């Protein structure tokens, strides 16, 4: 769909490839038929229809005119005729008698459009029509008791409302409290004057970005209260990959209809939004339908400054009692400037307690000082002062580069309470980094876990909005309880699938002016040749998981980091990768991969990082020489230090190479696939809700 929006910008298309409604009549006589009057009268059953296109299955023996010829057709819905309509054949296959034909309508009038959409509305109400672009929800059965308890505990503490669905009616309910000792759920009916009805009950509750369905009997009902047992099974359902929330008050959108300009400017309230979508409150007279392309859409709020989007209608709701209807669109920003402002608007709506870091840079630096962040790995505040100017400059730019950066802060009356950032370090991979939290508590009462939960939600949902996103990477500390309990536990649970990884790694600090003082010992050092790079990536693929190779751009076609470097340089920021090898008698025995990024991006220099790989049994003998060569490479680029991401267990060269790390730390490389991120966000929400309070456990 994004492709439809991108490519249609300059073509004048009014609707996407899959526009309108798919028709599914139980009996042929209840369906809509297409009548062709040329070259002879014939009738075909319509399978998909919109005001821009019709697809139909022709009767056997139907003779079709040449494609270049304009047709006149009629639509027949049980005696109600629309037309004549003009059209051109866009698809047919004369080799197959059962092949569908597609006809692109030309010059459909406003009245004809109304008639077509009226027929489709009636068919949708009767269950004979479904939007052609409707996505299928994701469903998974959860049967593990502890996971079910964790999910329902989160729903209870977060006070999320649910729905009780019965034949012919839907009632609002809430999980009032969860009696852990007896495994009983206490529900409250939120509809005044309503009754529970007959058991069993199908209830749907909402987590962070997922709906959960359960079926339970009633153990006890009393007025608007009901007690049920813990269900044996939960069905997990996710209709969207991006969470939608109510739009900020006063947000509006306007556009012109691409088919019927005589409708004038259409202006409506925005009711909800996500990074890739929004919902508008309109009327049937807007004449919108699934697949209709709207561009540009002008969106503005209380600030009055508009931004432009391109959108495709994906869903049209039923008419409400007040005559209005809500329709949903999938959208992309029109320009990079629109994208930066759209991401800021949506981020704030999704997580209103957080802010972008560019608004609070000096308080953010103070947070790093006060939280003890600078003392990690045995460093001092003074050690980081040389990076301060670069950090502030990069952070200011980050606000205008949402496809490269996200810097989240949680503000309070004390300044900045906590922060978490992410940066697109590789072609498909975002590095999550710089998590810091101020000691103590803010004056205003904050529920346990909310600050850390909000930081993760805003930062990771921002990453999720990148259409090229495939992996999250982080360098985590396994001795930190939160990291071990949330990040590592989740990744270890899914490691066997190949979509997650936790791997020990040592973060060794290397000073550029602290050479080993040893000769190269007969090694020839220099940039890797083509065949040596090929040998290196083969060795990496042999010794490392596939997710490691893909996430860190260590395949042959991406080893030079060209695409990523060009993206960074295009906005005036440095990003570079170089491979050096050590040769003995002309044969490469070891390699070091060197990476460079803006110094202030990560204060522990994770973008100025190196990795060592042996290419022969004697490869580790060349590590000291390669690290001295790396010192010169970084020094020529204005660096005073870099980080060696050490993945081996050989301590034999660390003293000679003058490498430094902090004893007692246990860092890890953490990887997670984009496919797992929605579920991980749900997991973070469950893990950070705190304990069930007395109010959640007793009457």
Image: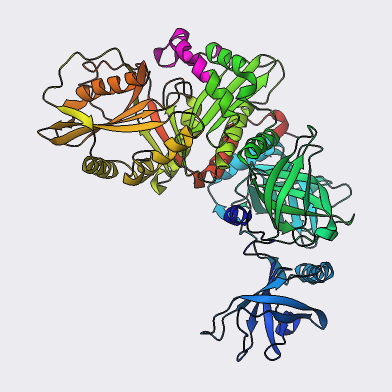
The range drawn in magenta is: 370-391
Task: Specify whether residue 373 is painted magenta.
Answer: yes
The extreme front residue here reads 68
Q: Position of residue 357 (x, y in %)?
A: 61, 24
Residue nearer the viewer, 129 or 663 = 129
Quadrant including the N terminus: bottom right
Q: Position of residue 484 (x, y in %)?
A: 46, 30
Residue nearer the viewer, 600 or 121 = 600
Q: Please identify the quarter of the rendering in which residue 146 is found.
A: top right
Q: Position of residue 615 (x, y in %)?
A: 19, 37
Q: In the picture shown, does residue 94 fall above or below 117?
A: below
> In this orientation, does residue 197 appear?
yes
Residue nearer the viewer, 295 or 164 = 295
Please report the residue visible at 51 percent of the width from the left and 19 percent of the height from the top. 391
Please report the residue visible at 76 percent of the width from the left and 62 percent of the height from the top. 259
Left or right of 373, for residue 641 = left
Q: Please identify the quarter of the rendering in which residue 386 is found.
A: top left
Quadrant including the C terminus: top right
Left or right of 463, for residue 157 = right
Please report the residue visible at 28 percent of the width from the left and 23 percent of the height from the top. 630
Q: Position of residue 179 (x, y in %)?
A: 67, 38
Task: Specify whether residue 229 is painted magenta.
Answer: no
Dominant secondary structure (helix, strand or loop) of the stretch shown in magenta: helix
Left or right of 370, for residue 522 = left
Please report the residue visible at 63 percent of the width from the left and 42 percent of the height from the top. 335
Left or right of 564, for residue 37 = right
Q: In the picture shown, does residue 264 fall above or below 431?
A: below
> In this orientation, does residue 426 appear?
no
Q: In the picture shown, does residue 438 fall above or below 650?
A: above
């Amino acid at each position: 769909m994004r492709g439809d929006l991108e490519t249609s910008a300059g073509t004048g298309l009014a609707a996407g490839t899959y526009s309108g409604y798919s028709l599914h009549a139980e009996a042929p006589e209840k369906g809509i038929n297409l009548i062709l009057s040329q070259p002879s009268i014939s009738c075909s059953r319509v399978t998909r229809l919109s005001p821009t296109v019709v697809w139909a299955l022709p009767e056997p023996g139907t003779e079709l005119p040449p494609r270049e010829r304009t047709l006149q057709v009629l639509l027949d819905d049980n005696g109600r005729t629309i037309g004549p309509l003009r059209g051109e054949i866009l698809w047919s296959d004369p080799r197959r008698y059962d092949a569908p034909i597609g006809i692109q309508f030309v010059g459909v009038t406003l009245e004809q459009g109304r008639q077509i959409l009226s027929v489709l509305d009636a068919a949708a109400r009767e269950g004979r029509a479904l939007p052609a672009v409707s996505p299928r929800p994701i469903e998974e059965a959860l049967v593990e008791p502890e996971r079910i308890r964790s999910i329902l505990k989160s729903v209870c503490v977060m006070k999320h409302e649910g729905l009780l669905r019965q034949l012919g009616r839907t009632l609002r309910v809430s999980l009032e409290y969860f009696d852990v000792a007896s495994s009983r759920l206490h529900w409250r009916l939120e509809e005044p004057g309503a009754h529970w009805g007959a058991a069993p009950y199908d209830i749907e509750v909402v987590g962070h970005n997922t709906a959960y369905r359960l079926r339970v009997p009633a153990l006890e009902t009393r007025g608007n209260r009901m007690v049920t047992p813990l269900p044996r099974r939960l069905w997990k359902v996710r209709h969207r990959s991006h969470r939608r929330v109510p739009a900020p008050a006063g947000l509006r959108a306007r556009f012109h209809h691409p088919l019927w300009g005589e409708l004038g400017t259409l202006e409506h309230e925005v009711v909800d939004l996500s990074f890739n979508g929004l919902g508008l409150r309109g009327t049937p007279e807007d004449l919108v339908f699934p697949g209709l392309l709207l561009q540009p859409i002008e969106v503005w709020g209380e600030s009055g400054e508009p931004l432009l989007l391109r959108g495709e209608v994906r869903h049209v709701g039923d008419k409400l009692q007040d005559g209005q209807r809500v329709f949903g669109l999938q959208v992309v920003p029109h320009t990079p400037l629109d994208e930066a402002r759209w991401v800021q608007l949506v981020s704030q709506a999704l997580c209103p307690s957080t802010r972008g870091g560019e608004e609070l840079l000096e308080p953010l630096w103070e947070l790093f000082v006060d939280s003890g962040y600078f003392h990690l790995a045995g460093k001092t505040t003074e050690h980081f002062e040389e990076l301060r100017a670069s950090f502030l400059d990069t952070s200011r730019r980050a606000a205008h580069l949402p496809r490269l950066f996200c810097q989240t802060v949680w503000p309070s009356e004390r300044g900045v309470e906590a922060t978490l950032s992410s940066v697109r370090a590789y072609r498909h991979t975002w590095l999550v980094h710089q998590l810091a939290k101020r000691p103590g508590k803010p004056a205003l009462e904050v529920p346990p876990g909310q600050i850390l939960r909000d930081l993760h939600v805003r930062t990771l949902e921002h990453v999720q909005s990148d259409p090229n996103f495939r992996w999250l990477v982080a360098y985590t500390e396994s001795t930190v309880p939160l990291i071990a309990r949330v990040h590592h536990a989740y990744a270890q649970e899914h490691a066997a699938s190949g979509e997650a990884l936790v791997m020990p790694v040592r973060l060794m600090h290397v000073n550029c002016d602290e050479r080993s003082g040893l000769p190269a010992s007969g090694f020839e050092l220099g940039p890797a040749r083509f065949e040596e790079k090929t040998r290196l990536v083969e060795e990496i693929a042999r010794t490392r998981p596939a997710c490691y190779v893909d996430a860190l751009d260590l395949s042959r076609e991406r080893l030079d980091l060209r695409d990523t470097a060009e993206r960074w340089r295009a906005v005036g920021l440095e990003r570079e990768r170089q491979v050096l090898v050590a040769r003995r008698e002309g044969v490469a025995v070891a390699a070091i991969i060197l990476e460079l990024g803006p110094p202030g991006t990560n204060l522990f220099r994770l973008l100025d990082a190196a990795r060592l790989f042996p290419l022969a049994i004697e490869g580790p003998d060349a590590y000291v020489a390669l690290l001295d060569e790396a010192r010169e490479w970084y020094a020529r680029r204005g660096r005073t230090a870099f980080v060696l991401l050490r993945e081996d267990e050989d301590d034999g060269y660390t003293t000679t190479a003058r490498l430094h790390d902090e004893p007692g730390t246990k860092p890890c490389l953490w990887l997670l696939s984009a496919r797992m991120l929605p579920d991980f966000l749900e997991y973070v929400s469950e893990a950070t809700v705190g304990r069930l309070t007395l109010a959640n456990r007793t009457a």
